[in-house]
Image (cartoon, rainbow, N blue to C red):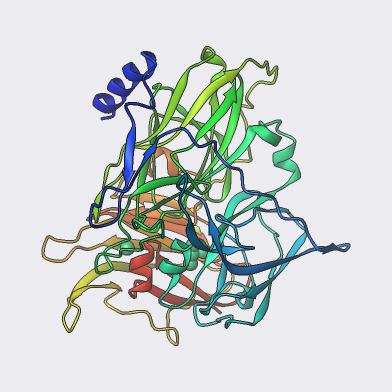
Amino acid sequence: MNSPVSRREFVALGAGVVAGAAMTRATSDHDTPTHPIRHFEVPLPIPRVLEPIRTDATTDYYEIVQREERVEILPGRHTVIWGYNGTFPGPTIKARRGRTVSIRHVNRLGTPTVVHLHGGVTPPESDGFPMDHVMPGEAREYVYPNAQRAATLWYHDHAMDHTGRNIYMGLAGLYLLEDDEERSLGLPEGPYDVPLLIQDRLFASDGSFHHKTVNHLGAKSGTMLVNGAPWPRLDVSTRACRFRIVNGCNATPLRLALSSGDPLIQIATDGGLLPVPVVCRQIPLAMAERVEIVIDFSRHSLGTNIVLQNLNTRGATGPISNEIMQFHVGRVEHDSRTMPTHLAEGQPVDRSAAIRTRQFVFSVRPSFGPRPGPSWRINGRRFDPETPIASPGYGDVEIWRFINKRFLGVLGIVHPVHVHLVTFKVLERNGRPPLAHETGWKDTVALDRDEEVSVIAKFEGYRGRYLLHCHNLEHEDHSMMARFDVV
Ligand code: C2O
Ligand code: CU
Ligand code: CU
């Protein structure tokens, strides 16, 4: 499936013509030729790790100010962003299992905001229910107990009806939860443990973000940004590196592959380490899904360029770039450590422990009126913050079946289904076992057109009000969301 594109690019890379072959214009929606961006020229930035303002025996305390800032994303242009501490992406929070993180968010923006820790087992009052707005000028404390496995999480806005816009404007950052078990494995660490937060953006000709939702189908794709930089380049050395990859796009499902044909050695899913590494040729990564991979650059000679590709070049709203970033093998370095073959305890699922099965149909209806367009639904309903769609008992194990139902043969597009509070295991995808990359703990699962996916989860951690929704943010904001309560 990947051969036509990757072979051509592989040849091009071998011949040393990289930059010239890959130039894309950062266009506005009107196709005004604006600012051609050379791919792989900007170095990959690594978001700064935030320092706590105070710590005590149990807790690290942080403060984040949400504010507007003018930053340079496209060389020579200015973009106004809404950022956590005025940065895009926001600062990285490093948390340790068993130590509480408390973050006081101050809203200095002109719009109400909500913060959600995606993947967090979080008490309901800190989970970021869309109506729990922090109004401009106000502040709120969010508390994360971190009594959960090490994993790559991310935090982002979750404001009612405006999550898509708020995240597009910059309100997202990484939250890396570590534990001793993971530490002891000897995986690549420090500068060899690299987060890659992928977010695509369309730019208007004045450099501003252009959040074009195409009637709530999904934000239109454009320039690929990794950690806030367009089609960046990372200089690596001849050794193994760990990458924590987050699809932070509003509406762009990706399919990752390497132009060198190297396999992707997957070590973790949304919910942390897999029992053993899984070798994948390609990894589909829908919005909000995370995957951690190890790439061993020791097989390559100095000067080699390897492109992290996106093989999924079409979305709901038009073409998507087939390139994400480049690794340039620029240094010789030896690493005597070998990749662990065992990563974590096995995580068998006992299907028979499930005491009930629920079904959730993700569908669309045309809506008429002044601005006709699709209206996204779960079980035929629009988001109702007052009424839970399901109320599992605390400690219950349930099977949830997600079904993607298209309307009259149209609009069959991917819905990444996300459940707050719990991590689940995929039991079945279209009656078959889960795909190779989704065998671990997950909190988000892609539901492509006409697909049916069953997952199993134990509803524990906290009682209270949580959410189930599509992580295409334009669908989420246009009603493809439901409340569930753990009772
Ligand atoms: Cu990443 Cu409810 O969200
Ligand atoms: Cu979430
Ligand atoms: Cu959707």
- Residue positioned most to the bottom: 386
Say which residue appears at 32% left-offset and 39% top-offset: 24
Farthest-out residue, right: 57
Q: Nearer the viewer, residue 435 or 125?
A: 125
Q: Residue at x 63, y 41 (%)?
A: 345
| Residue 213 picture quarter | bottom left
As rendered, which of 251 and 125 lies closer to the eye? 251
In the rendered view, does 385 fall on the left or right side of 448? right
Above or below for 44 versus 93: above
Which residue is at 55% across, 56% downward? 88
| Left or right of 112, for residue 86 | right
**Residue 359 visible, this orientation:** no
**Can you give x and y, in whole percent of width and height, for residue 317 in the image?**
24, 56
Q: x%, y% of residue 463?
A: 60, 76
Query: Residue 358 versus residue 451: which sits nearer the camera?
Result: 451
**What is the x, y in percent for residue 189?**
69, 34
Which quarter of the rendered picture does the C terminus lie within? Answer: bottom right
Q: Residue at x 35, y 49 (%)?
A: 253
Quarter that holds the N terminus: top left
Instruction: Place residue 400 in its image quadrant.
Output: bottom left
Of residues 356 and 156, which is closer to you in this image?
156
Q: Name above or below for residue 253 compared with residue 391.
A: above
Q: Is residue 112 above or below residue 303?
A: below
Tell me, yes or no, if residue 16 can be seen here. Answer: yes
